[in-house]
Amino acid sequence: MKFMVGVDAGGTKTEAVAYTLAGKEIGHGVSSFGNLLLHHEEASRHIAEAVQQSMSAIKEGSCCGIWIGMAGYTPQTVEALQLYMRKNFPGIACQIEDDATIAHAAMFKGKDGILTIAGTGSICLGCCHNQYLRGGGWGHLLGDEGSAYWIAIQALRHMVSEEDQRIPRSALSQAVFHALQLKTVHDIKSFVYSATKDKIAALAVIVQQQGDQGEHTALGILKEAGQKLAQLTISVLNRCENQQMRIAGYGGIFEHCEIVRASFIHHMEERINGLDYLFTPISATKGCYYLFSKHWRDIKGK
Amino acid sequence: MKFMVGVDAGGTKTEAVAYTLAGKEIGHGVSSFGNLLLHHEEASRHIAEAVQQSMSAIKEGSCCGIWIGMAGYTPQTVEALQLYMRKNFPGIACQIEDDATIAHAAMFKGKDGILTIAGTGSICLGCCHNQYLRGGGWGHLLGDEGSAYWIAIQALRHMVSEEDQRIPRSALSQAVFHALQLKTVHDIKSFVYSATKDKIAALAVIVQQQGDQGEHTALGILKEAGQKLAQLTISVLNRCENQQMRIAGYGGIFEHCEIVRASFIHHMEERINGLDYLFTPISATKGCYYLFSKHWRDIKGK
């Protein structure tokens, strides 16, 4: 039995799934972070571990290829991972893409569409007539509007602004104070400048909970997040020949936050009516399978 | 002859000035950074070096006290520096304040007023009936609006937004590209995430030069900086009993950027008319002298 392995190598975990050439899942592996920018060797080892696990239950048959989507995609990390995979999986072709590309392929089954991702950061990737178009993805200092990190920072900025203007603490501020066990507003500073980006981004959950309860400030932040994500998507849509592209939202913010989704659609509809929207989460490893299949057909077709 | 030493211990350099009790400068010393958060031991040594230099030309007489204003003021750094100074200058009383407090005293000769500082970061410090009021100073992730770092980041965000929307590069963008010797807009990302805060903030000079030449985007950023600094100042003014406080602007942005100053005054005047504005730069070490004198008079008066 022939099969391929799709890998989603992320900032916190790595998932590998072995698929038959018909797309049936036959093996699964999970390990820790696979972003080589965090730690070259450890990340490479995690990726290999997940791949090994996904293959372990398959008794016979040959692996036709490994397709990886990685966070922290740079020419250097791609080269390092290629070398590592060649050594650890000799004779198996390994293709490496960035994580947005495999998520796009997963959501649209390898076809055209515009995918906007709102996780810790935010980025938009469109594919129109086999041509990729990008927007955003500039990181937390230059952009990432609408992302979990951005939502969390808006809440924290709101808290320091309450302090500067000596206005009473909003319910949102109180919830964040409680969650972080802060005593004074000055502890916010200590928290922000010592915490990792992920830890800050995790506060978005509190904003979402408060928003779901109708808290005014949280609602404002979440609606603005949806608007910013729509603006990013529109900046990519504007560059597509086909204006009737399908639109997908991916990542924790789209997955868990109804208010952001609704605001996103609302602001998209202001620009263009009647588009199709997909928000159903799907394993990005399936995108690897779709990309592999296309590639495999091309090879066999020759 | 009796004298005191005032010290301005900053993020890039430390200045120490010996003053007679009548306020006449009789010795001067300069060394490298004095922010203990950057490096405890080195910063302490730089401060002691500058103090020593400022005293070296004074043949006789006793030092009545050392007054230090330091960047990176925290309970821990104050304690560490106190210990170091006690060991290196035994028998001389040493008082430590944060850098904003001595700049405030320098600008207002130890009297009431509201000082807004726009250097790498931004902060506002008011003193009303001997009571200090603060606003801003939250650092680059939470605020620092109107600061050199903020101005630089606005310019860089504008550049990536041009890329996302595929609009032609503005003259400001071209100037930044040239100054940083960047090839593509993606090099901005590499620059921002590897550069120190100071190096990013240094780009504010290019925004200022472009603004002076009437470049549209630069003008917009600088005017907004002035507005943000006015908002910060007003948030402090609103908490003062006396609404006719004198207002001072301090730091590189106020010192060098006429457009920011004009916008600042314009937005202040919208809130309250006829205030006095001071922008003349003065050595913050003189503020140490004013604070020391007040303290000295209090001691002698007892």
Image (tube, coloured by chain):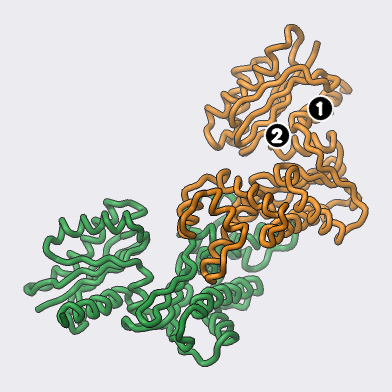
Chain colours: A green, B orange
Query: Can you identify the residue that label 1 sits on?
Result: B295
User: In this rendering, would B212 be left or right of A147?
Assistant: right
Q: Amino acid at mark 2?
A: Glu
Could you tell me how many numbered marks the image carries? 2
Mark 2 → mark 1, Cα distance in angstroms: 13 Å
* Tag 1 subunit: B
The local crowd at label 2, few if under 14, some if 14 to 19, many if 20 or more residues have their Cα within 10 Å, is some
User: In this rendering, would B76 be left or right of B264?
Assistant: left
Residue at image position (36%, 81%) is A107
Q: Looking at the rendered structure, which numbered label has been put on residue B83? A: none
**Residue at the left extreme, as displayed:** A60
Residue at image position (49%, 68%) is A136
Residue A242 position in % (x across, y down): 45, 86
Query: Can you identify the residue that label 2 sits on?
Result: B97
Closest to the observer: A212 or B109?
B109
Is mark 2 in CB contact (under 8 Å) with mark 1?
A: no
Which quarter shows the N terminus of chain A? bottom left
Discs 2 and 1 share one subunit: yes
Residue at image position (50%, 77%) is A233
Label 1 sits on a secondary structure element that is: helix
Label 2 sits on a secondary structure element that is: strand
* Tag 2 subunit: B
Residue B263 occupies quadrant: bottom right
Residue at image position (74%, 58%) is B223
Residue B92 position in % (x across, y down): 70, 17
**Residue at the right extreme, as displayed:** B274
User: In this rendering, would A283 be left or right of A213?
Assistant: left
Residue A75: in sight, yes or no? yes
Q: Amino acid at mark 1?
A: His
Residue B157 occupies quadrant: bottom right
User: In this rendering, would A70 be left or right of B110?
Assistant: left
Closest to the observer: A15 or A210?
A15
